[in-house]
Amino acid sequence: MPSGSADISSILDRILDAATDNLRIAKILVQMGLDPDNVTYDAIFNRLLEIFVHNITFANLFAAVGAGFFVATLLMRTMVPLRVANMIGCAFFAAFGALTANVSTFLLYLLLLPINALRLRQMLKLVKKARHAAEGDMSIEWLKPFMTERKYRRGDTLFKLGDPAKEMLLTVTGKFLVKEINVEILPGALMGELGFLTPDNRRTGTIECIEDGQVLTITYDRLLEIYFQDPQFGYYFLVLTSQRLLQNIDRLQKQLNAARATTTNRIA
């Protein structure tokens, strides 16, 4: 073990001697206040420590902490803590600029503070809206200004199974019937939302008006714009379609159980 340590030490000494023979490195050592002809690792370490201690000021301490927070932003996977760390880093760099009388640095990071604060506020609002949507507290009322009014009379067919789907409807008044599953749709319900998700945008059922009523419509193109612009609506739409599919599964399960009971009674 001691021989191994001696070998490593001798190798490092040879590397250091070769480095000091290099003209450029020799100039750097001179600039650092070291003698190229008599340089050791201890001398280099002590000189670097001396330079570090000499340059530690209150302003540079702020810059070092700010740099630490900026490095931390590169390690974060989510936007909220990233924005918080970025704001703290900006605050420390702005303080560094003020203490060193560097106007450009001060103004730059002072300007970044409200920008990050605005983005952080927007992110927190989106998280809050998403939680409300998950809890079922979101209302579709805000979508109405983007929709167009349309009226139907009893006996009218809104669309048929397999028709091209280009719009979603919200019932306002009247009653409508999904003919394939014999389910009534009352005011305040969405219709045609599943066609938005099907690969070929086809209607998944036939809907007929059974009582004069009014609906609001919105095209899938407009719906797609809102979907990408507002994550709240995207999350709500996901919840809505999931609930509709679960309802369909539950309805089919009940029909299957009823058919099995009928068959059992006939056999008995």
Image (cartoon, grey):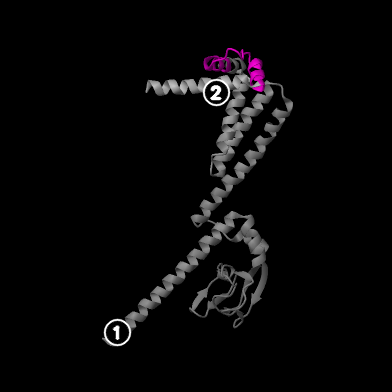
Amino acid identity at mark 1? Asn
**Mark number for residue 15?**
2
Q: Residues within 10 Å of mark 1 (few under 14, many from 20)?
A: few
Residue 38 or residue 221, whichever sits in front: 38
Q: In which quarter of the image is residue 148?
A: bottom right
- Quadrant of the snapshot with the C terminus: bottom left
Magenta-drawn segment: 23-48
Helix or strand or loop: what does disc 1 sit on?
helix
Q: Position of residue 180 (x, y in %)?
A: 50, 80
Question: What residue is at 66 percent from the left and 65 percent from the top?
Answer: 221
Q: How crowded is mark 2: few (under 14 residues within 10 Å), some or many (20 or more)?
A: few
Question: What residue is at 60 percent from the left and 16 percent from the top?
Answer: 51
Amino acid identity at mark 2? Ile
Query: Can you identify the residue that label 1 sits on?
Result: 265
Question: What residue is at 38 percent from the left and 20 percent from the top?
Answer: 2
Helix or strand or loop: what does disc 2 sit on?
helix
Residue 231 or residue 125, whichever sits in front: 231
Q: Does the magenta stretch include residue 226?
A: no
| Of the image marks 2 and 1, the number of the one nearer the N terminus | 2
Q: Position of residue 142 (x, y in %)?
A: 62, 58
